[in-house]
Image: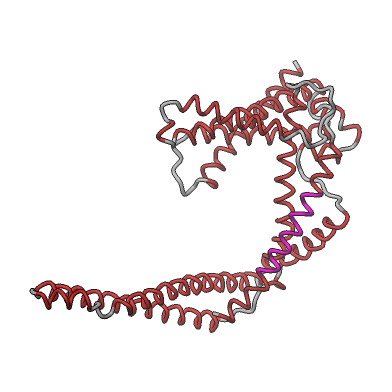
Amino acid sequence: MSFLVDSVIMFTSQVLFFGFGWLFFMRQLFKDYEVRQYVVQVVFSVTFAFSCTMFELIIFEILGVLSSTSRYFHWKLNLYVILLVLIFVVPFYIGYFVVSNIRLLQRQRLLFSCVVWFTFMYFFWKLGDPFPILSPKHGILSIEQLISRVGVIGVTLMALLSGFGAVNCPYTYMSYFLRNVTDSDILALERRLLQTMDMIVSKKKRIAMTRRQMYQRGEEQNKQTGFWGMIKSVTSSPSGSENLFVIQQEVDALEELSRQLFLETVDLQATKERIEYSKTFQGKYFNFLGYFFSIYCVWKIFMGMYFVSSVLLMRMSMPLEYRTIVTEVLGELQFNFYHRWFDVIFLVSALSSILFLYLAHKQAPEKHMTL
């Protein structure tokens, strides 16, 4: 009876998570687009629902909600379902969708979709060879083989995003990194953009008039007959042909300059909005968070003590008495490897982001002075 009640609770939460994922997909991710492939919505909502359920089970492990037998059963069920979706359903459907958009392969799209999926499985399986993620005694179809490879990909992506986010967040919200932009700067740049556009229009008018004159002269030359008319048409080059090439080069250069001026104008407008936003209460709050994340990023880069909210990483942060079922379900994975791998990728991502943002911040004033 207890197992039945626990199953009803888990099923109800999964239905709620599925509905929330469906609404999030329609109202946020694709609110400006029309989605005709309902399979995409279903797969996204199922993945979202079972992912949230796994986090829910971690909370249940800590709080002791549901019986241990029920938690173990639902851990197994969730892992098998989400691995089935991530490794089999999603790659196959992506391959099927790509093949369906290639005309030459549409008649045999199912066959070629299987070829794409087997190719994915080959590289997915070979992914685990360089990493010490498993002990040799695990079978080829064991859950440890699958979740260890998914864990490498997931931890790598999370480390890259976390490293970039820890650097980009202070750069975005801290007022220290904002340039001093005034209305006169924006007006001057807009005025120069308008002058450049006027020059482009005038030069294109000159090109059109020159081509028209050349066309009229060509018609007059065609009317001339006889030996001397032929000699004149061969030996004389149409006046203005050389100027057309030079003017066209000038137009190309001005159009490139106009694009740069436009992008710089948009950048200055965005910076001015950020300055105005930083003066509000919410802006000051995010400015404080920017300093906090700066300290946090430095701490992460030099000490390397970090864990994120995922099953593989959260297992290490849970107390020993709460790890039992999670360890039994996930098997003998090398959890320490995932932490070390995360720290290495985080370090590379954070340092690369710092270098990129530093160069962008340094070149922005120089570019503005040049323009």
The image quadrant that residue 310 belongs to is top right
Q: What's drawn in magenta, residue-wise?
A: 344-360
Task: Tell whether 284 sits left or right of 265.
Answer: right
Q: Quadrant of residue 205?
A: bottom left
Q: Residue furthest front?
A: 227
Is residue 54 within the magenta segment?
no
Location of residue 132 with respect to 238 vertically, above or below? above
* Left or right, 128 with reference to 84: right
User: Percent position (x, y) of residue 23?
Assistant: 55, 40
Residue for point 59% across, 38% down:
21
Q: Is residue 234 left or right of residue 36?
A: left
**Nearer the observer, 159 or 230:** 230
Q: Position of residue 218 (x, y in %)?
A: 17, 73
Is residue 354 rendered magenta in the image? yes
Q: Point out the residue furthest to the top here.
A: 1
Q: What residue appears at the point 64 percent right and 79 percent down from the top-left corner?
A: 180
Q: Nearer the viewer, residue 116 or 150?
A: 116
Q: 215 or 174: nearer the eye?
A: 215
- Towards the viewer: 231 or 47: 231
Q: Is residue 26 above or below residue 176?
A: above
Dominant secondary-structure state across the stretch colored magenta: helix
Where residue 165 sits: x, y (%)?
A: 71, 56
Picture quadrant where residue 176 is located: bottom right
How are the residues colored? Answer: secondary structure
**Residue 248 percent location from the top left of the image:** 37, 74
- Residue drawn at x 50%, y 24% is 111
Residue 215 is at least partly visible in this image: yes
Residue 327 seen from this side: no
